[in-house]
Image (cartoon, rainbow, N blue to C red):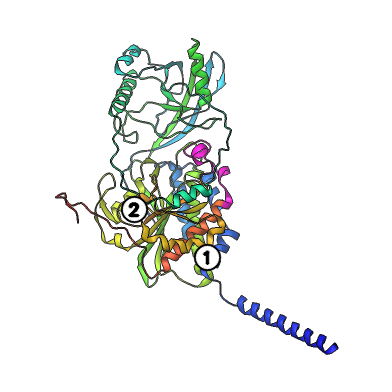
Amino acid sequence: MKKLLLLSTVFNLLFCASLFAQEDKESDKPPTPQDVIRDNGMENSQVMEIASWITDVYGPRLTGSPMLDKATDWAVGQLKDWGYKNVHLDEWGPFGRGWEMKHFEMHCKAPMYFPIIAYPKAWSPSTSGTVEGEVIYLDAASEEELEAYKGKLKGKFVFIDTLRILKEWEEPLAKRLTNDDLLEMANAPAPTPRPFRRWNRSGRNFYRVLRNFLYEEQPLAYVSRSYKGDLGTVFVSGASAKKGSARDEGAEVLPQVTMSVEHYNRVFRLLNKGIPVTLSMNLEVEFSNPDGMEHNIIAEIPGTDLKDEVVMFGAHFDSWHTGTGATDNGAGSCVMMEAARILMETIKETGIQPRRTLRIALWTGEEQGLLGSKGYVKNHLADTDDLGNLQDVKPAQSKISAYYNLDNGTGKIRGVYLQGNAEVRSVFREWLDPFKDDGASTLTLKNTGGTDHLAFHAVGIPGFQFIQDNVAYWSRTHHSNMDNWDHLVEDDLKQAATIVATFVWNTSQRDDMIPRRKMEVKTAEGGSK
């Protein structure tokens, strides 16, 4: 029995020694790029600190504004500090004049006092100090009905929207994609081309008549309330000019204000009771950007054997002016910058270089119509018309393997919109599999729009936007005064940066470029080639 116990003990000791030796041997193995990416992205993340610089320090970042210039200088310096090469500003334009709000206040003065939650629309002009006047509701839906207000609007604050009835929220504002939502997306068929959508001509014509009437009457300001938002959340964008764009030098622009719906409704109800309402307002702005040109931020890690081919990843860096541009699109920008940092750390820690050149792009002018990314494509990759439609390709177009974009708020990545490119499904499936437990597994043939990947997709380059959880993007933060750092979700951004870095790295190391969909280019004679 003692011999058996002795043999058993010896065997156990030898077995344990073997295990320790095996562990030591495995610990001696260099980490794989995937290991380093996940470790830096999930355990040693800097994404929230990057986000704070972009939003708290350099927000908002309205295109053309001095604050965007400061944010740009910071991003350029940070990318250089991380070791990126060819860091530069890529010019596009003309964009027009810049605008920055220096001071704004609005108050109800009579029949009682209360401070008003409101924001001027971007490119509204300054008032002559504090201005004060009565409120009038412009209740007209035709040119004939406008005649009743002729000569009555000068020196007044004109309300142009009706009362909006609010309902209390009985469901959460923040929502995530359910399994059923993701299954429906995964089973969606290939998209069909969208036909040109014609506007309702009668509605558009009256809007022009109304706008011209307001400019003839010269009120102190005209005031709207957005079609969504409550609890003090105000959704605001840009002002309209009498003619052309409000960004045009010398454009005639009236002060335009968007008011919180609760305050708008209160004033509206007072007017309905026949009680006059007086408001005061003081708006001070500064116009800038005399040459009208703007810039995207570009930086690279050079490739090796396939260095002439490029993997691009990016997000739009600009924002609107009422919040600090956190979920739109500080989230996408900090994720892409964090992915850029992770990729550089991966190279340092593994000693493995990317085969293809890695290129990060932070776009400007997105909020005014994808202007920065379209400008980049037109300058470097393809000839396009004013709408961004492909006319012909340039040699560099064939060298872009893929472009990856993030621009739907703080929500975690749940998969990828394939933009009808079925051939890439098997490639992306393999890359997403390690992230199933992180909630990312869905591939859909569906298109998605409204952001910078479209500029690349339109000229035949595989351009992709990631599927993201909505959280409270559309209901609370998108283009609103609540778009601040506090509404960013750290775990979601860490997951997104890790996945983006993985996709960029894997794209750089493939033997082949990402499969492309077939493009049809119209010739001048109306045929195709």
Q: Residue at x 46, y 60 (%)?
A: 80
Q: Which mark identifies residue 457?
A: 2
Residue 471 appears anywhere in the view: yes
Q: Which residue is under mark 1?
A: 345
- Check disc 1 and give the amino acid type: Glu
Query: Height in image: 215 above or below 375?
Result: above
Q: Position of residue 349 (x, y in %)?
A: 54, 70
Q: Are marks 2 and 1 in contact (CB under 8 Å)?
A: no
Q: CA distance from mark 2 to mark 1?
A: 30 Å
Q: Nearer the viewer, residue 423 or 516?
A: 423
Tell which residue pokes out farthest to the left in this image: 525
Element on which disc 1 rests: helix
Tell which residue pokes out farthest to the top in this image: 274
Question: Residue 383 in magenta?
Answer: no
The residues colored magenta run: 470-491
Asked where in the image residue 66 lies, by quadrant, the reply is top left
Q: Residue at x 30, y 47 (%)?
A: 193
